[in-house]
Image (cartoon, helix red, strand yellow):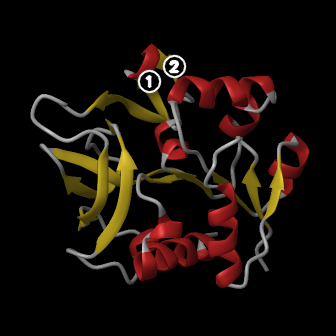
């Protein structure tokens, strides 16, 4: 039985992610305690808002090194996924550095920013996190900064060019969209994550 911990990173989506997990029969614990987080079988790093306050919160809680050292499956959601990368243009913020690349702001002269609403997923690699998620299925996004496409990209979307929607590098995974607001696709992604060893 999985023991899932939600990192108490201060994101406003924590409650809705927790409820989405409860619908799958998983009662996730909310914690900012490094020992509790390390003891979990699965860790979710949620987040809504900006990169700089997100990293500041992790530093204040003394969790930067704790998150970097995790060996169990980790899932970053929305801002939580962005924080897994090396750097964000948003306030020139150094992030956790677990996935290579820099987050860049969508071009607001040609696009509506933030990118908000439903967008179709295009799987790029075969991965257990994508089980039951087919090309063209839709997920719900709200974000102003885009992760690049690279070797770590499991699925991408198009919005003024391609960006990473689902990523994985080692035991670290990320979803740019909100699984808790993405209906059956979001539920499937969370279920797949819980099934990872």
**First in sequence: mark 1 vs mark 2:** 1
At 33% across and 39% down in the image, what residue appears? 147
Which residue position holds label 1? 87
Binning the other alpha carbons within 10 Å of mark 1 as few (below 14), some (14 to 19) or many (20 upward) gives many
- Which picture quadrant has residue 33? top right
Look at the numbered discs 1 and 2 and tell me whether their residues touch, using CB distance below 8 Å: yes
The answer to which of 69 and 123 lies nearer the viewer is 123
The answer to which of 2 and 17 lies nearer the viewer is 17
Which residue position holds label 2? 94
Task: Where is residue 108? Give x, y as percent.
Answer: 19, 31
At 71% across and 78% down in the image, what residue appears? 22
Binning the other alpha carbons within 10 Å of mark 2 as few (below 14), some (14 to 19) or many (20 upward) gives some
Left or right of residue 35: residue 190: left
Residue 142: mark in rendering: none
Q: Decide: is 136 above or below 172.
A: below
At 26% across and 66% down in the image, what residue appears? 121
Find numbered disc 2 in the image and state the secondary structure of the residue it sits on: strand
Task: Where is residue 116? Give x, y as percent.
Answer: 31, 52
């Amino acid at each position: 039985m999985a023991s899932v911990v939600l990192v108490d990173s201060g994101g406003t989506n924590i409650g809705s992610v927790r409820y989405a997990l409860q619908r799958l029969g998983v009662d996730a614990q909310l914690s900012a305690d490094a020992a509790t987080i390390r003891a979990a079988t699965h860790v979710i790093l949620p987040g809504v808002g900006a990169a700089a306050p997100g990293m500041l919160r992790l530093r204040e809680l003394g969790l930067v090194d704790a998150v970097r050292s995790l060996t169990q499956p980790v899932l970053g959601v929305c801002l939580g996924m962005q924080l897994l990368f090396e750097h964000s243009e948003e306030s020139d913020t150094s992030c956790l550095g677990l996935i290579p690349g820099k987050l860049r702001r969508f071009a607001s002269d040609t696009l509506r920013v933030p990118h908000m609403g439903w967008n179709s997923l295009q799987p790029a690699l075969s991965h257990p996190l994508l089980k039951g998620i087919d090309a063209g299925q839709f997920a719900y996004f709200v974000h102003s900064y885009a992760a690049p496409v690279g070797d770590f990209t499991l699925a991408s979307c198009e919005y003024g060019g391609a960006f990473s929607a689902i990523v994985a590098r080692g035991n670290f995974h990320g979803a740019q969209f909100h699984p808790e607001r993405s209906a059956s696709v979001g539920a499937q992604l969370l279920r797949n994550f819980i099934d990872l060893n």
